[in-house]
Image (cartoon, helix red, strand yellow):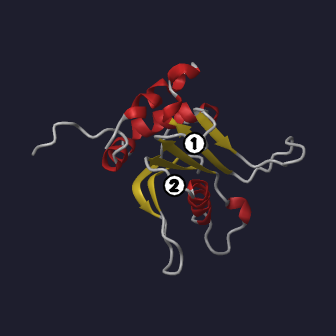
Amino acid sequence: MVRTERPGITNNLVFGHVMSIKRNCLELLRRIYPELNLTDVEEIISQYDGNSGFTEKRFRLDILASDKDGNLFDLEMQTSTLMSLPQRMQYYATGMNKMTLKPGEHYDKLRTTHAIFFCTFDPFGQGEGVYDFDFHDRKTRTIRFDAGMHIKVFNSKHGLESGNSKFLGLYEWRNCSD
């Protein structure tokens, strides 16, 4: 039997191919982070193996990209619900942080990292289209701990009713399947 349907953007190979094209990756990152005023993506690695030893838990990033300012971006397509998804997000974000310093380098050389997850479900059950995580003081909520590590999660099931037109293209794949 021959499959007549084409795989959508949620397919690992399709996502990797589409996002490994610099103009696609740059446009997506510009929409996600307009405040960064990105003009170029320096390097894109599909299926980046971030492992550095035999005794560590392995991790593989769907897309690892960097810009001219040294920012690192991890783009992940998440189609299956995992009980430990927040921990996985943290592990990937800290994994990127870990790989930015060489032995003997000072911590001020640590690069800013952005872990971006595109979920085909609502991972937090709050009905939001975008969840944006940074560090802040729990009591005052006014003190930001600028650790240079950011996690952003897109919920494709949120729909287009949000009125956020710059993300309309992102939500078109919300019902795609492998």
Marking on residue 153:
1
- Residue 19 on image: x %, y %: 39, 43
Amino acid type of the residue tagged 2 in the rendering:
Leu
**52 or 153, nearer to the observer:** 153
Considering only vertical position in the picture, is 105 above or below 116?
A: below
- Residue 170 on image: x %, y %: 46, 31
Number of residues whose C-alpha sits closer than 10 Å to that of mark 2, classed few (under 14), some (14–19) or many (20 or more): few
- Dot 2 falls on a residue whose secondary structure is loop
Q: Image check: 91 left or right of 60?
A: right
- Dot 1 falls on a residue whose secondary structure is strand
Considering only vertical position in the picture, is 59 above or below 154?
A: below
Considering only vertical position in the picture, is 13 above or below 125?
A: below
Q: Image check: 134 left or right of 52?
A: right
Q: Is residue 39 visible?
A: no
The reply to whether callout 2 and callout 1 are in contact (CB within 8 Å) is no
Marking on residue 82:
2
Q: The N terminus appears in which quarter of the rendering? A: top left
Residue farthest along the right direction in this orientation: 140
Point out the frontmost of discs 2 and 1. Answer: 2
Q: Is residue 146 visible?
A: yes
> Image quarter for residue 88?
bottom right
- Residue 80 on image: x %, y %: 44, 50
Is tag 2's residue or tag 1's residue first in the polypeptide sequence?
2
Residue found 80% across the figure and 50% down from its top: 145
**65 or 87, nearer to the observer:** 87
